[in-house]
């Protein structure tokens, strides 16, 4: 692919991403307000998993296999498996293989000194500052049901291990005009398995804790902690644990744009939990203001918020 065609493809891709974020933001802000959103979220997170019957089917199932007749099915399965797993094996040959002369790392911030992206192999092996890189992210989100406030610190070590500590708060005004809150902590670790100058790919895991300061003392399947309270009221902090696998991409297509994609899927309590975020940022030295959209599923409950924030690269 020649440089002109590649630039055209990248510009069209960015335009589609920006258009998608704009549509999601409009939808997020235009939906009618619904009271009790966080009550539905906490109820969903504490709901036990749906039980399934262990009895045998009345019709039974006795699979048979014929190599000659099912060769097409095997081929289709292998092709499908290759496509599904391509996010794990394709990025390295695509962005990193044969790209570096020395061990790669990161600039102090994207496009520093006119460089084409964020990755570099022009590092001082004796410098402590060049042995790690960091990114601090602060964001706020708005939806028809309330607000989301978030923060995340990611430290990338020279052995390609990333350590992150993040969290967010969901805030909603209830019918009594009081603020209902839920807190989530998400410490994690990831592996940078493909490091290019313009794109980096990571996969890992996060431990999730949902902290509910309005836990019910009488009906609380989480792990309650008695906090006491005024007038001998029962005030409990309910904790619901979970874990997710994560996959993320940082893309630096053209100075000064930064596009990030993050996906996570796992369990919270006994319910399915997923997280998807897409942002577009503008690098101004080590500071990057960004906008985007974030979507979460907790069981059957959907939480979508438009977001805006600031990243500091160091």
Image: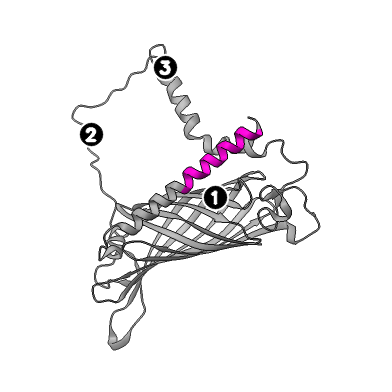
Distance in Å between CA atoms under marks 2 and 3: 30 Å
N-terminal of the pair, mark 1 or mark 2, is: 2
Image depth: mark 1 or mark 2 in front = 1
Residue at 47 percent across and 43 percent down: it is 16
Looking at the rendered structure, which numbered label has been put on residue 72? 3
Considering the whole magenta stretch, tell me its main secondary structure.
helix
Instruction: Report crowding for label 2: few under 14, some 14 to 19, many 20 or more residues within 10 A (C-alpha).
Output: few
Which is in the foreground here, disc 2 or disc 3? Answer: 3
Residue at horizontal 66 percent and vertical 61 percent from the top = 285
- Mark number for residue 259? 1
**Vertical position of residue 131 compared to residue 169: above or below:** above
Whether residue 270 is visible? no
* Neighbours of disc 1 within 10 Å: few (<14), some (14-19), many (20+): many
Location of residue 274 with respect to 5 vertically, above or below: below
Q: Toward the viewer: 116 or 193? A: 116
Relative vertical location of residue 146 with respect to residue 112 in this rendering, above or below:
below
Residue drawn at x 38%, y 66% is 147
Vertical placement of 117 versus 311: above or below?
A: above
Q: Position of residue 227 (x, y in %)?
A: 36, 79
Q: From the viewer's perspective, is the residue at label 3 or at label 1 nearer?
A: 1
Residue drawn at the location 53% of the way across and 57% of the way down:
188
Magenta span of residues: 3-18
Q: Which mark is residue 192?
A: none
State the residue position of label 2.
56
């Amino acid at each position: 692919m020649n440089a002109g065609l590649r630039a055209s493809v990248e510009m069209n891709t960015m335009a589609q991403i920006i258009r998608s974020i704009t549509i999601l933001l409009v939808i997020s802000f235009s939906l009618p307000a619904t009271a009790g959103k966080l009550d539905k979220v906490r109820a969903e997170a504490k709901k036990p998993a749906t039980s399934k019957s262990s009895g045998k089917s009345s019709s039974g199932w006795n699979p048979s296999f014929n190599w000659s007749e099912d060769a097409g099915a095997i081929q289709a399965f292998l092709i499908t498996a290759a496509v599904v797993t391509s996010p794990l094996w394709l990025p390295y040959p695509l962005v990193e293989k044969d790209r570096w002369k020395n061990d790669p790392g990161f600039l102090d911030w994207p496009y520093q000194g006119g460089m084409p992206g964020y990755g570099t192999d022009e590092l001082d092996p004796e410098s402590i500052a060049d042995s790690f890189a960091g990114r601090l992210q602060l964001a706020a989100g708005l939806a028809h049901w309330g607000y989301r406030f978030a923060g995340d610190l990611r430290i990338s070590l020279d052995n390609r291990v990333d350590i992150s500590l993040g969290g967010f708060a969901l805030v909603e005004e209830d019918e009594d005009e009081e603020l209902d809150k839920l807190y989530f902590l998400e410490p994690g670790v990831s592996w940078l398995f493909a490091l290019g100058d313009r794109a980096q790919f990571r996969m890992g895991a996060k431990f999730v804790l949902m902290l509910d300061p309005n836990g019910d003392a009488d009906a609380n399947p989480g792990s309650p902690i008695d906090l006491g309270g005024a007038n001998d009221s029962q005030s409990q902090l309910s904790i619901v644990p979970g874990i997710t696998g994560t996959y993320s991409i940082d893309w630096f297509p053209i100075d000064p744009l930064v596009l990030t994609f993050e996906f996570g899927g796992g369990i919270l309590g006994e319910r399915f939990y997923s997280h998807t975020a897409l942002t577009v940022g503008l690098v101004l030295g080590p500071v990057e203001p960004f906008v985007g959209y974030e979507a979460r599923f907790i069981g059957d409950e959907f939480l979508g918020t438009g977001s805006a924030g600031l990243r500091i690269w160091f």
